[in-house]
Image (cartoon, rainbow, N blue to C red):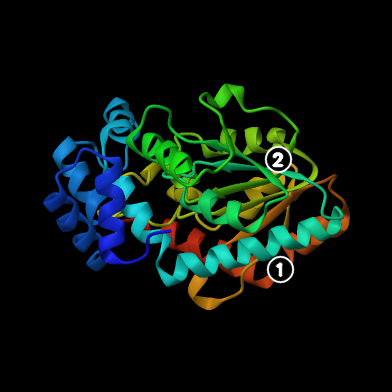
Amino acid sequence: MPETFMELIDEIDEMTEIHREEIKERVWNEALNPGWNVMNDATEFNIDFHIYNDKMENFYRESYGFVFETYLESIRCGKRRVMELIESRITEYLGRVNDREIKILMLGDGIGCDLTRLYSEFKQAKFFYYDVPGSKTYDFAIKRFQKYEIEVELINRFEDIPLEIFDVIVFLEVLEHLADPIEAIKNISNFLKMDGIILVTESFAEVNSKFPTHLKSNIKYAGRTPFLFHKSGLLLNYYSKEELLSFRPTEYIKRRRNIKDVLNLYFDGWILLHFFFYRIKNLLGSFK
């Protein structure tokens, strides 16, 4: 997989119609200033920052910004560490199911960086991919899967995602973009089989000019994610306590709730601290 500056440029040049000199400029700016491409494209597309509407939908389909952002993000140290932890959680799950073949859904995986990495690690898994159909990121992912001979089942419509068949769902940095994250979590619960797991990262709290597609309407969910999943029968099973990762990733398991699960969640000091921090922050912000 490409990792050097020139290797990244070569692959993007191969898979897009962007002029090579523009690719170099975009990669360089993204490397120095994470989020530069999405922020720059958002301004050019004249979207309404932090508001989901037709302009935002068109932006997701037509902008190359996320191609550069997610590609560069995939090779940063923080994201690599998150993926290492995700691999360890999947490995632990495999141990619980005696290393049988499992089904993994990569939900909102953009250009497919995470799927590509996990595919090389888990040969006993069958992979499924869903992202915005017809978007630049989706088209880029398909070309990468073909180039690296990755066997993956493509899902073109959200409504076509099969129910209760997935052992693992990987769902990274998507919730903050969605118009209705609560409904999305309910749907995800239906996609998982009983005792299946979902690995999540989110950035509800990051609503600023650097992230124009993070929705203002979702900032109220900052610090509440474990409780939102709990309501849909997805119980907190693990979260990273590494300081720089800020709970990334968090793992939820689909199983019947019991009193122990409730007590573990509501008496977890780190979870409560996170919850009250953002409750107070949002409350203070409402007075500005």
For discs 2 and 1, the disc positioned in front in the rendered view: 2
At label 1, the amino acid type is Asp
Quadrant in which residue 179 is drawn: top left
Quarter of the figure that contains the N terminus: bottom left
**Residue 224 shows up from this direction:** no
Q: Is residue 149 left or right of residue 134?
A: right
- Picture coordinates of residue 236 (x, y %)? 72, 56
| Rendered location of residue 70, percent (x, y) | 37, 53
Please name the residue that numbered disc 1 is placed on.
268
Q: Which residue is at the front of the view, 4 or 275?
A: 4
Label pair 2/1, CB-CB below 8 angstroms: no
The numbered mark at residue 228 is none
Report the number of numbered marks.
2
Q: Determine whether 219 is above or below 129 in the image.
A: below
Residue placed under numbered mark 2 in the picture? 232
Instruction: Using the image as rendered, state which of residue 205 and residue 109 is in the foreground.
Output: 109
x, y (%) of residue 26?
19, 55
Q: Secondary structure at mark 2?
A: loop
Report the residue that reaches farthest toward the bottom.
243
Q: Which comes before the other along the chain, label 2 or label 1?
A: 2
Residue at disc 1, secondary structure: loop
